[in-house]
Amino acid sequence: MLSKRSQHIPNGYPKGSVNAYKYETKTFITYTEKLSISKMGALQIVFSRKEEDDTSDLRYMRYIVTDNLSLSTSDILTIYTYRWQIELYFKELKSYLGLGDYQMLPFQAIVRHVDCVIMSFMYLEHLRICKLKEDPKSKQCRYARTLQMSYVVQHEVRMITIAYLKRTLKNGTFSKLEQKLMEKLPLVA
């Protein structure tokens, strides 16, 4: 993940307080300051920018603030890198699994709704992992998100229903029905 790199001190920073961290292919210059701010208490602020960005232009500077003073600069940056995945997680819960689709209900009903949404997400993720174990080289399962996995479940349910109809109906009747059903079913990516 993050690895400490050679010390590089850009203009304007006090000597000995700046670190450079390499994350994937990007190198960040950081400066960490612990401050006590009234009505907020003790805080740790990490000032960070990419190594190649202009040091005089503050638009390139990122500020990360935490009240956890025991974290190292490396730990703070590592935790911050998860931020985008968390944003995607909540977007998928809202967009595809209906996290925000409740009306004013008793608090317990809202809690149950959130529980159902999270269980649905966990089931889809479990299904994705199981399919990935069956075929570890499957790029479709490796990079599939919530929406794609919900399509996989819908497709499997339809195929199970068709198999049930095939077993229960006479062959001549089923072949015409199967042809009509397959024309109407959407393709799964």
Image: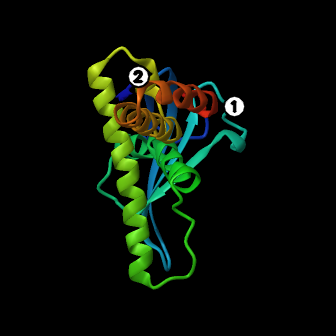
Query: Which type of secondary structure does the marked residue at label 2 adopt?
Result: loop
Q: Amino acid at mark 1?
A: Asp
The residue furthest bottom is 106
Marks 2/1: CA–CA distance? 19 Å
> Is the C terminus in the top left, top right, bottom left or bottom right quadrant?
top right
What residue is shown at x 31% (from left), y 32% (from top)? 129
Disc number placed over residue 14 in the picture, else none: none
Disc number placed over residue 54 in the picture, else none: 1
- Relative to residue 172, is residue 124 drawn left or right? left
Q: Amino acid at mark 2?
A: Ser
Q: Residues within 10 Å of mark 2 (few under 14, many from 20)?
A: few
Can residue 165 be seen in this snapshot? Answer: yes
- Mark 2 and mark 1 lie on one chain; the one further toward the N terminus is 2
Name the residue beneath numbered marker 2.
Answer: 6
Residue 136 spot, x, y in % from top left: 31, 17
Residue 121 spot, x, y in % from top left: 40, 49
Residue 170 spot, x, y in % from top left: 41, 30
- Relative to residue 149, is residue 91 drawn left or right? right
Q: Residue 66 sits in which quadrant?
A: bottom left
- Relative to residue 177, is residue 72 drawn left or right? left
Q: Residues within 10 Å of mark 1 (few under 14, many from 20)?
A: few
Location of residue 134 with respect to 88 vertically, above or below: above
The residue furthest top is 137
Can residue 23 be seen in this snapshot? Answer: no
What residue is shown at x 48% (from left), y 41% (from top)? 150
What residue is shown at x 47% (from left), y 74% (from top)? 40
Residue 116 spot, x, y in % from top left: 39, 62
